[in-house]
Amino acid sequence: MTQNIGSYDRVIRMALAAAIAAGLLVLGKQFSAPELLAWLLIPLFLLLTGAIGYCPLYGVLGLSTHRPWQR
């Protein structure tokens, strides 16, 4: 699996995942347990793709923000 997420994209994904998860923790009492778990899949997906550097959706669409090191 080749990386297709660049460093800026990874940082943005992880920050966005943290912000969404924090918002869900604050607003969590307004959702039922199944709804909250469903909404938590979004930050989980962002966190995992940011951590491993590969996004399956980018792979399907043929996109890549990853630039290999050039010397």
Image (cartoon, rainbow, N blue to C red):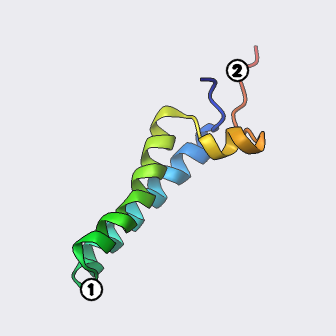
Locate residue 70 relative to residue 10 in the image: left or right.
right
Provide the residue designation for mark 1. Answer: 30
Q: Which amino acid, mark 1?
A: Gln
Number of numbered discs visible in the structure rendering: 2
Q: Is the residue 30 above or below the residue 63 in the image?
A: below
Q: Position of residue 67 (x, y in %)?
A: 72, 30
Q: Position of residue 5 (x, y in %)?
A: 63, 38
- Decide which of tag 2 and tag 1 comes sooner along the chain: 1
Q: Regarding mark 2 in the picture, which secondary structure is present there?
A: loop
User: Extreme front residue here?
Assistant: 34
Locate residue 25 relative to residue 52 in the image: left or right.
left
Locate residue 30 relative to residue 69 in the image: left or right.
left
Q: Is the residue 30 above or below the residue 40 in the image?
A: below
Q: Residue at x 61, y 41 (%)?
A: 56
- Between disc 2 and disc 1, the foreground one is 1
Cα–Cα gap, marks 2 and 1: 46 Å
Q: Where on the picture, by quarter, is residue 10?
A: top right
Q: Residue at x 41, y 67 (%)?
A: 20
Q: Find residue 8 and name its label.
A: none
Q: Is the residue 37 above or below the residue 10 in the image?
A: below
Q: Regarding mark 1 in the picture, which secondary structure is present there?
A: helix
Provide the residue designation for mark 2. Answer: 69
Q: Where on the picture, by quarter, is residue 6?
A: top right
Q: Position of residue 43 (x, y in %)?
A: 42, 57
Q: Which amino acid, mark 2?
A: Trp
Of the pair 37 and 71, the residue shown nearer to us: 37
The N terminus sits in image quarter: top right
Q: Residue at x 71, y 23 (%)?
A: 68
Dot 2: few (<14), some (14–19), or many (≥20) neighbours within 10 Å?
few
